[in-house]
Image (tube, helix red, strand yellow):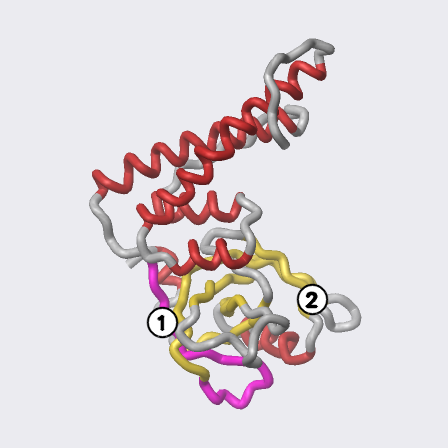
Amino acid sequence: MSEALLKVAGLKHLPLFPLPLVALPNEFVPLHIFEERYRQMLKDVERERNIFGISFFDPETSFIDKPATETVGCAVEIRQSETLPDGRSNVLTLGIVRYRLIDYVDSGEPYFVGDVEFFEDASEERNVVEPLADEVFELFERMAKAAFKIGGGRGKLPEIQRSDPESLSFLITAAFNFDNEKKYALLEMTSTSKRLGELKTILNQTVGQMEESAEIQTVSRTNGHSKKRIDL
């Protein structure tokens, strides 16, 4: 059993925080909690495991008043919490593992509680997924270096850790400013190779342009000239 699944072992009923955003495993998600029912939820989960679920839900585009069953969310762990004098809280959470919402539990609490099933990606052959992860990681490193140059290249480029393929796929997904629909589609996939394949396509489409942009920025800072153009 993975470390992520161990953290939620035995946890079947999960307090839910519906939000118009998609949280991912290993992604830091800052939250500002002000509604009374979620203040209560925060107090309750802090007495237990510091874990609750973030389910994507946009009330402006939904015909129901809560996330639908069978949808996918991400269990998050509270890493930092600051309670303000008026009772509001600023909370920093970290995504742990995905869940599928099976049903709602009548817990008597003012917030939603879900009957959930936690899951990770299906097992795949290492000789298939590892080479793909290496390709995607290399492309991502190139993109990060280009972004660093575009930003001025001050200081030292942070080292990017090469994690396991599934974690890597979510790390890179979090780095992109995807819309919720695209991010959710990548969240609910259960194939690491399929997710990496989609990210590889996106990176191949963007990394070359970013590197050209970085070169133009570098040349312009030295009062030089570049013959290359880039469509922005």
Q: As displayed, is residue 142 above or below residue 72?
A: above
Place residue 21 in its image quadrant: bottom right
Q: Horizontal and vertical percent for residue 129? A: 28, 42
Q: Residue at (53%, 80%) from the top-left corner?
A: 112
Report which residue position mark 2 lands on: 89
Report which residue position mark 1 lands on: 117
Q: Horizontal and vertical percent for residue 138? A: 41, 30
Q: Is residue 117 magenta?
A: yes
Camera-side residue of 154 and 64? 64
Q: As displayed, is residue 172 above or below residue 60?
A: above
Q: Is residue 153 magenta?
A: no
Q: Horizontal and vertical percent for residue 85? A: 79, 69
Camera-side residue of 1 and 198? 198
Place residue 18 in its image quadrant: bottom right
Mark 2 crowdedness (10 Å alpha carbons): few <14, some 14-19, many ≥20: some
Q: Residue at (48%, 69%) from the top-left corner?
A: 49
Q: Secondary structure at mark 1?
A: strand
C-alpha gap between disc 2 and disc 1: 28 Å
Q: As displayed, is residue 77 above or below residue 45?
A: above
Q: Residue at (52%, 56%) from the top-left corner?
A: 94
Q: Horizontal and vertical percent for residue 134? A: 34, 33
CB atoms of marks 2 and 1 within 8 Å? no
Q: Residue at (52%, 74%) from the top-left corner?
A: 16
Camera-side residue of 51 and 146? 146
- Label 2 sits on what residue type? Ser
Q: Specify the segment rendered in magenta.
A: 105-120
130 left or right, relative to 103: left
**Quadrant of the drawing holding the N terminus:** bottom left
- Label 1 sits on what residue type? Glu
Q: As displayed, is residue 19 above or below residue 68?
A: above
Which numbered disc, 2 or 1, marks the residue that appears first in the sequence?
A: 2
